[in-house]
Image (cartoon, helix red, strand yellow):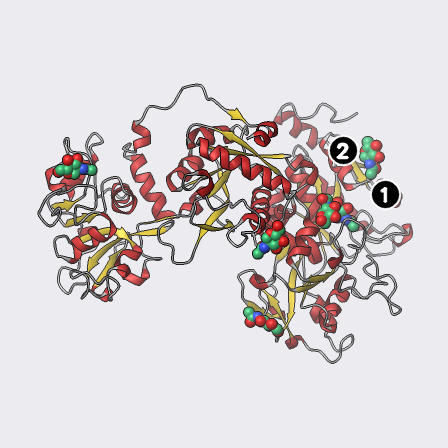
Amino acid sequence: MRHSACCFALLLCFHTAAMLSLLRWCTVSDQELAKCSDMSKAFSRANILPELACVNGGSAVNCTSMINWNLADAMTVDGGTIYQAGKENGLKPVVAEAYGQDVGTSYYAVAVVKADSNLTINRLRGAKTCHTGINRTAGWNIPVGFLLDSGRMPMMGCNVSKAVSDYFKASCVPGAGESGHPASLCELCKGDETGQSKCELNPREEYYDYAGAFRCLVDGPGEVAFVKHTTVPEATDGRALSSWSLEDFQLLCRDGSRAAVTEWRTCHLARVPAHAVITRQDMEGSLIFELLNQGQQRFNGGDSSFQMFDSTAYGGKNLLFKDSTTELVPIMEQTYQAWLGDEYLHAMRGLDCDPKRLPEFLRWCVLSTEEIWKCSKMATVFKSQNLKPEIQCVSAQSPEQCMQHIQKREIDAVVLAGKDIYVAGKTYGLVPAAAEHYADGDTTSTYYAVAVVKRATSDVFTIHELQHKRSCHTGYGRMAGWNIPIGLLLQKGFIQPQECNVLKAVSGFFSASCIPTTENEGYPANLCELCIGDSKGNFRCNASNQETYYGYTGAFRCLADGRGDVAFVKHSSVFENTDGHNTDAWASMLRSGDFQLLCPNGARAEVAQFAGCHWGQVPPRAIMVHPDTNALVVYGLLDKAQDFFGKDNTTNGFKMFSSADFQKQDLIFKDSTVAIVPVGERRTFKSWLGQPFLDSLEGWEFSQCSRAASKPVNVIPLLVTILTLATISSA
Ligand SMILES: *[C@@H]1O[C@H](CO)[C@@H](O)[C@H](O)[C@H]1NC(C)=O
Ligand SMILES: *[C@@H]1O[C@H](CO)[C@@H](O)[C@H](O)[C@H]1NC(C)=O
Ligand SMILES: *[C@@H]1O[C@H](CO)[C@@H](O)[C@H](O)[C@H]1NC(C)=O
Ligand SMILES: *[C@@H]1O[C@H](CO)[C@@H](O)[C@H](O)[C@H]1NC(C)=O
Ligand SMILES: *[C@@H]1O[C@H](CO)[C@@H](O)[C@H](O)[C@H]1NC(C)=O
Ligand SMILES: *[C@@H]1O[C@H](CO)[C@@H](O)[C@H](O)[C@H]1NC(C)=O
């Protein structure tokens, strides 16, 4: 009857909402319906307006879609439902339950260990764990969601309980006894005194619920218990567990540290928001609060026959509202994100993986014939190990074409390097889902670009006094020697090219340089002035090893020899050529302590401090996807795949990180990759690239001098070959 045609215009909505004459409450059970109907009568007798009606939706999921479709208006739900309803149906929380002075509208989910344990949040793999119950907030959703979302716990094909069982050594998760859950999830459970009811989701299982999960830790089988912040103080108050005290336990913090049990405000896995009343966007939240507020003033405590926060009369618990509610309070910022908070939101995001929505295929963008071969083989062997989702290979002609297709969701994933990651993020909105990881000490695949100078007592110049200095570069167009430093100097406005003539601008900025090149025409002479060629003086400024000052070592030598004042190289160049690491005559006496770094912020730093004083990090290559693609699914597949086909396993024929069988290098993945790793908190292209590198890329872009910008955009219709499984198996 009423707002059936609501929301065609905002004004109309506001009008309708302001005149709200009936509020339809959605209930999930017959018991709730009975209580709701009593509440409606009680409110009506007390002349509380608008009128309250009750509709039975049968379940929280049904109710949220009924509210969305304007068949109901409001209901109270937990955080998980607030997340789903907010994300899927755009519903908003407007009124919250409060549970008394101490906790207010929330509690904290914590991970408890014994004080003498050596576990941290980063060392939980292989631990023995105690949970309050399957799908419960503090005992399951928060810890599992946190570990999944942060990339610590890999998950293939949305199979959460399989991921948990693979990650932990053994667990007690009451309720995980039914089929479909791995047996290890019930392994630590105890059952009742006679050993019956093991792993049941009820108090007959001794390790069930908060007190039970804590008991599972105290008794010994478990090493960590996922409970809430009040559990340990309650259990160690001298009555329940007389021989234990608070000091015997500690909390695991998100940052990898540990803290006393009393520090739960700062050391927890997530703040869990209170249950809240949700409604549609077009409903005026304050009107719903007004109604409920009038109600709670009459029917909370006192001697009235109807009690809003008591469910005993209906033979149930927590009907309509939690029984522990002391009052209802209005929510100020009415968005589901603000109400849930980042910690909780991220945990929900980790669990937000519906196997029914899992795509059957992950379409992988490949660029060359050899890559198609390798990808086809990869698809076949992944399938043979039952890895999900299956790989499908799609070819395109350039990284940029891959990005376009991913943006349109015609392809799902591609591996990209630094500058392409920038374009993929900036122009096509793609995000990193997983990344290559190279061996420790591998400074070829990823490194920092630095500006090395001699330690000096006089003329201690910084980046601000670089003008008119003599510079040594690895080579024209190279990453550490040209793209990154010149980009940053452009971005900071030190170099201001006229009409995009960067070469001319650079030649005017430095007094003399050695920037080996393959170009001859119009190359400013002073950019070659410091170069010396080979031992006979031939090949001067030649971009090849015949030029003594070419490359990382050459550019560093140019500085060491005193020809230049600054060398643009990578962080390892200094160490490779000093302290006896290079025995050539020119280098044998050099000491790393005689050199320093110029930082972009105007400081100087020691050469070992490159991580905090660099001009840009060439980051590891990343697998880039559409922001709506579940990054954890992509990582989960590759993580499982590398168990079979990664560096450590030579038994299965196919090798993900080798291209030898296909007569090329770096096909799909770089051959120097040792593992695929999660991106952790670096979920955007910006955080993946890091600020200095981003600055230098933007320096090129803003000065409109990037090569990409000067090239005409490819407008040839895209040729895309979808290799079906039929062609894969025939390949
Ligand atoms: C949800 O709603 C549909 C249609 O309205 C109904 O058939 C179904 O039984 C409901 N589900 C539950 C759990 O009540
Ligand atoms: C932690 O302690 C366990 C036994 O208490 C031991 O086996 C393990 O090696 C320790 N781990 C670390 C990283 O110290
Ligand atoms: C736990 O939640 C999952 C996902 O929502 C659901 O499929 C499963 O049935 C639930 N298990 C139990 C025991 O409630
Ligand atoms: C999850 O994995 C377990 C063990 O491999 C399997 O029994 C179960 O069917 C899987 N569940 C789903 C939803 O795929
Ligand atoms: C190197 O120098 C030689 C002779 O000076 C020239 O013929 C050749 O083209 C140069 N090569 C490059 C890569 O610049
Ligand atoms: C290599 O793969 C096989 C399965 O094909 C597996 O049983 C074995 O554990 C793997 N080895 C390593 C070191 O991961």
Tell me if the residue at label 2 has its CB under 8 Å from ligand 1. Answer: yes
Mark 1: few, some, or many residues within 10 Å (few <14, many ≥20)?
some
**What amino acid type is highlighted by mark number 1?**
Ser
Mark 2: few, some, or many residues within 10 Å (few <14, many ≥20)?
some
- Which residue is disc 1 drawn over? 29
Q: Is residue 520 visible?
A: yes
- Which residue is disc 2 drawn over? 66
Q: Nearer the viewer, residue 442 or 624?
A: 442
Percent position (x, y) of residue 10? 62, 27
User: Can you tell which quarter of the image residue 283 is in?
Assistant: top right
Q: Is residue 163 above or below residue 427?
A: below
Q: Report the Cα–Cα distance between label 1 and label 2.
A: 15 Å
Instruction: Look at 59% across and 41% down and name the residue there.
Output: 381
Describe residue 258's horizontal placement relative to residue 468 as left or right: right
Percent position (x, y) of residue 546? 17, 46
Residue at far left of view: 536
Dot 1 or dot 2, earlier in sequence: 1
User: Can you tell which quarter of the image residue 540 is in?
Assistant: top left
Q: Nearer the viewer, residue 457 or 529?
A: 529
